[in-house]
Image: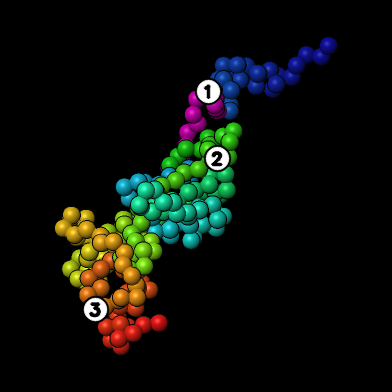
Amino acid sequence: MKKPKLRELKEAVIALVAGPYTIDFPKSPPPIPVEFRGKPEYQEEECIGCGACSEVCPANAIEITEEQKDDKIYRILTVHLDNCVYCGTCVEKCTTKKGIIQNQEFDLAVFDRADAVEKVEKEMVKCEICGRPFATKDHLKWIYHRLGSSVAGNWTLMLVGLGELELVAQTPERDKRRIGRNDNARILCPDCRRNVILSEEWGTFE
């Protein structure tokens, strides 16, 4: 039987003393770089539900749906982690720059794909003429605070902002065939706002 080579014997002794070269995962977590792009995660307080993340997602991994609960309608944004490529575009293009982040969580294996989701719900604002939901309440509030005193030029934004201060309440929807000048002071979707302006200027609308 040939004697082992000295180089191989040296490597065996070093491995015995220094321990394994590989990391001890999953027994202990590996070191993670600060720049690591992990699990996308919505921030409830910062997300305004605008849907910009869904528009720019190259993998179409972010789904937007609407759901009615009692008399309110909610926009639900869902990140399907099993389709996500973790590119960080949603984080980069977020309107508020804080609504969605990527944490350092990487061990995302699940037995059921239905568990591979990250979601957030945002209440929507309904038009007071046609009743159609057209934006989330948090989105309009965010614009209201960004505009400052210039918000006085937009009744919808101003009323949503005053509603946040509990100075006004949203009124029930009304028959859109009875549009008049007084409807300017209502929370309206873009289509009904256009019709109110046409009615005021020309006495009719399409």
Q: CA distance from mark 1 to mark 2?
A: 27 Å
Residue 47 included in the magenta stretch of the image: no
Q: Residue 172 in the image: x percent, y percent?
A: 28, 61
Residue 181: image tag: 3
The front one of 86 and 13 is 86
State the residue in front, 108 or 5.
Answer: 108
Tell me whether circle 3 and circle 2 mark residues in contact (CB < 8 Å).
no
Front disc: 1 or 2: 2
Indicate the amino acid at tag 1.
Lys
For the record, the magenta segment spans 23-34
Q: Secondary structure at mark 2?
A: helix
Q: Is residue 104 left or right of residue 126?
A: right
From the viewer's side, name the closer residue of 97 and 173. 173
User: Would residue 126 appear left or right of 28 to someone viewing this image?
Assistant: left
Residue 120 at what x, y percent from top left? 41, 47
Judging depth in this view, the residue of 143 and 162 nearest the camera is 162
Query: Which residue is denoted by mark 2 in the rendering?
Result: 114
**Residue 7 marker:** none
Q: Nearer the viewer, mark 3 or mark 1?
A: 3
Q: Is residue 85 above or below residue 127?
A: above
| Residue 16 visible in rendering | yes
**CA distance separating discs 3 and 1:** 69 Å
Residue 99: x percent and y percent? 37, 51
Q: Residue lying farthest left?
A: 167
Position in image of residue 95 (x %, y %): 37, 59
Q: Residue at x 31, y 57 (%)?
A: 137
